[in-house]
Amino acid sequence: MRGHETKSRGRIQFNLPDSVDPAVCVRENFPVVATNPILILPFALLLGAMALAPVLAPRWWEKHYPKIALSLGAVTAGVYFFVLHDVKSLGHAAQEYFSFIALVGSLFVVSGGIHIGVKGGATPFRNVAFLFAGALLANVLGTTGAAMLLIRPWLRMNQKRVAAHHVVFFIFIVANVGGCLTPIGDPPLFLGFLQGVPFWWVAKNCWPMWAVAVGALLTIFYAVDRIHFCRAPQLVQEKESACESWRFEGLGNLFFLAVILGAVFLTTPIFLREGLMIAAAFGSWFTTKKSVHAANSFNFHPAIEVAILFAGIFATMPPALAWLEQNAGVLLGQNPSAGSLYFGTGTLSAVLDNAPTYLGFMSALAGVTGVLDIKVLLQDYGGHLIAISVGAVFFGAATYIGNGPNFMVKAVAEQSGVRMPTFIEFLLKFSLPFLLPVLAAVWLLFFRS
C-alpha cells in the first residue's frame, strides 16, 4: 500500500485507498476544540464509575449503570452535535460502535449455539493445555471468537473449583495475548493489515514475544492453579482427575462462525459486513436446538450489559482519541525508542480502544520519521512497529475495557456464578502482580534498546 502525505495540523497520516472504509481506520481532521482535555471528563467519569461503583455501591451500580453510561455518553454527544457541530466524528463513533456490537453480539449468539460437553479434567496440567490451545485458536478465530467459543467449556471444566483466577488468566491468554500472530487475531493487527502490513509479517516478527508472554503466563497460571488444586477437597481432586470424553453439539453453527469471520474482511459496500454478521446470528438462533441453548444456560443478559456499557464508552471516547491524534507526535518526541512506543501504545490501549490507539501511534511514527511509504517504514523502523503491535495487543489484557471480549467474558462468568474481581481488584490482584512482570520481561528482552 502506498502512503501519502496529508496536512492535518502538522501531522502526517496514512490514508487508505478508496476501497477501504476510513471510518474504521484513521480519524482525520478533528476540530481543534475537540482536543480540549475538559471534553475527556465524561470518559474519565465513566471509567471511574466502572472502577469504583461496583466496590462502593454494588447494588446501586447494578441498578443504575445503564443511566450512568448512557447519560455521560449523551453529554459528550450533545457537545459534539450542538456545540462543535462535528457530526462526522459522531458518525464515526456510531459506526464503530455498530461494527463492534455486530461482531461481538453475533459471535456471542453463534458460540452460544455450540455446546462443548466436558466433565472433570480440570487438573492444572489439562487447564494449561486448554489455555495453550485457546491461544493458538485466537489467531484463527480472533480473540473475540475464541473467547466466546471456549469460555463456557472452560467454566464447565473447572466447575467443581472454579475461581476468579481461572477467568482472569483466560482473559490474559485467550482473549488478548494469544491473538498476536495473525491480523485476524486482534483488531489492531487487522487494521495494520489494511494499512499495508503483510499478512505474515506479524507472525514472522512477533512470535518471540508471543512465545515468551504466553509461556510465562501459562507457567504463572500453572503455579497458581496447582496451589488452588492442592487446597481442594480430595473428592473434588479425584473427580476432576478422571479422564472423560468430550462431546460437541450444534456444530452446524461452525458455518455461521465462518460467515462472521469472512465478513470481517469486507469493507464495501457500507454495512454489508455488519449485515452478514447479524444474518448469521439470526440463522444460528433459529436453527439451533433449544436443548443446546439450555445446556449452555444461554441468555442475552451478558450481551445487553456489554452493549450498554460500551455505548457509553464509544460515545465518550472521541475526545480522548482526538487528543491522542493531536498529541501523539509530541508525546513520542523526535526520536522515539521502541520501548517508549511499546509502553505508550500499551498504556493507552488498556483504557482506550486499542485499534485506533495502534493507528494513532503508527501515524505518529510515520510523521516524526518522515517515512510515508509503509514498505520503507517496515524496513527501516520494523522494530518500532513490532513494539506498537505487541503493546496494543498485550496491554489490552490489563483492564476489563482494554479489549472487546474482556468484558463479555466477565459477564458470562458472572452469569455462571463466578465471583469476578471488580475493576480495581482486577488491576491490583491480577494485572499488577501477574501480568505486569510479564509485560516488563517482554520489554526487557526485546524493546529495551
Image (cartoon, helix red, strand yellow):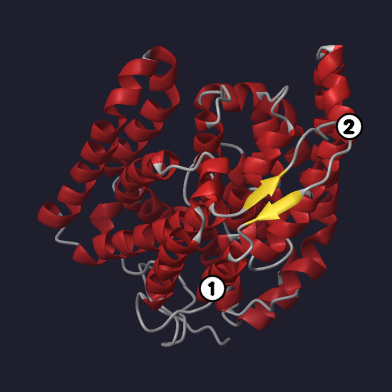
Measuring from the top left, give residue 409's x and y in whole percent.
Answer: 56, 40
- Crowding near pointer 2: few (<14 within 10 Å), some, many (20+)? few
Give the Cα separation between the discs numbered 1 and 2.
37 Å
Which residue is rendered at x = 49% and y = 36% of the image? 411
Which residue is rendered at x = 24% and y = 67% of the image? 88
Location of residue 302 (image quadrant):
top left
In the rendered structure, find residue 242 and report the number of the disc placed on it.
2
In the rendered structure, find residue 259 and report the number of the disc placed on it.
1
The three-letter amino acid code for the residue at tag 1 is Val
Up-down relation of residue 447 to residue 438 (above or below): below
Up-down relation of residue 204 to residue 354 (above or below): below
Location of residue 390 (image quadrant):
bottom right
From the viewer's perspective, is 332 left or right of 136?
left
Seen from the viewer's position, the closer of residues 70 and 35 is 70
The three-letter amino acid code for the residue at tag 2 is Ala
Measuring from the top left, give residue 438's x and y in whole percent.
Answer: 77, 38
From the viewer's perspective, is 44 left or right of 359?
left
From the viewer's perspective, is 205 left or right of 370?
right
Measuring from the top left, give residue 223's x and y in whole percent.
Answer: 86, 26
Location of residue 140 (image quadrant):
bottom right
N-term mark: 1 or 2 = 2
Up-down relation of residue 415 to residue 89 (above or below): above
Q: State whether residue 94 appears in this view.
A: yes
Measuring from the top left, give residue 84's x and y in whole percent.
Answer: 16, 57
